[in-house]
Amino acid sequence: MATAFGSEQMFSTTARHQLLQVTVEPDQRSKLIQDTDTQYGPFTKQLGLDTEGRPPAGATFVSRTMPAGTTIRSYTGSTADVDVWCASLFGLTGANAGKQIPVKEGWLTMTMSLHWTSDGWKLTAYTQKDGPQPTDQGAEFGTAPQL
């Protein structure tokens, strides 16, 4: 989920709605769709993308998120709150990308509230914040999955 939520899909209205249809618990879908439309709609326009997340001709939009660690904040068997610490690449590249949004790397933490259903884990709530950077004093990076 973290990789998909940090991808170009989130900047396309159609692709974002499709993603939320399959990852979000049914009784939370309309709220999360409305919340993400409110969040991503204006931001997409600021980036110079159209409503389907397409960049201007001659430019390529890059939005990649790579999970680097997880922390389970709580777990009850059918619910879980999980922090996913991620590295990211974000921006526009190419001849017509302009200089205001070059591709840069960054770090972010997604907090996902999940509920186990007959279809597997489904999202019930989601937030994202910048950081921590690997060099931040006291940064918590989560733990590697146990095999």
Image (cartoon, rainbow, N blue to C red):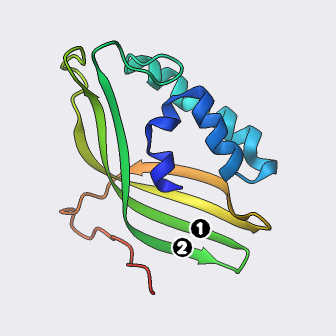
Q: Position of residue 94 (x, y in %)?
A: 21, 22
Among the 4 quarters of the image, the one containing residue 115: bottom right
The C terminus lies in quadrant:
bottom left
Residue linked to disc 1: 81
Q: Secondary structure at mark 2?
A: strand
- The tag on residue 48 is none
Q: Nearer the viewer, residue 104 or 139?
A: 104
Residue shown at 73% from the left, 40% from the top: 31
Q: Earlier in the sequence, mark 2 or mark 1?
A: 2
Q: Position of residue 6 (x, y in %)?
A: 44, 45
Q: Nearer the viewer, residue 132 or 106?
A: 106
Q: Secondary structure at mark 1?
A: strand
In the rendered image, the vertical position of residue 36 relative to residue 92, given as above or below: below
The N terminus lies in quadrant:
bottom right
Determine whether, in the image, residue 69 is placed left or right of residue 26: left
Residue linked to disc 2: 73
Whether the residues at callouts 2 and 1 have beta carbons within 8 Å, the answer is: yes
Three-letter code for the amino acid on which mark 2 is drawn:
Arg
Q: Position of residue 142 (x, y in %)?
A: 38, 73
Residue shown at 65% from the left, 35% from the top: 17
Residue shown at 58% from the left, 34% from the top: 15
Among the 4 quarters of the image, the one containing residue 39: top right
The residue lying furthest to the bottom in this view is 147
Q: Position of residue 111 (x, y in %)?
A: 52, 58
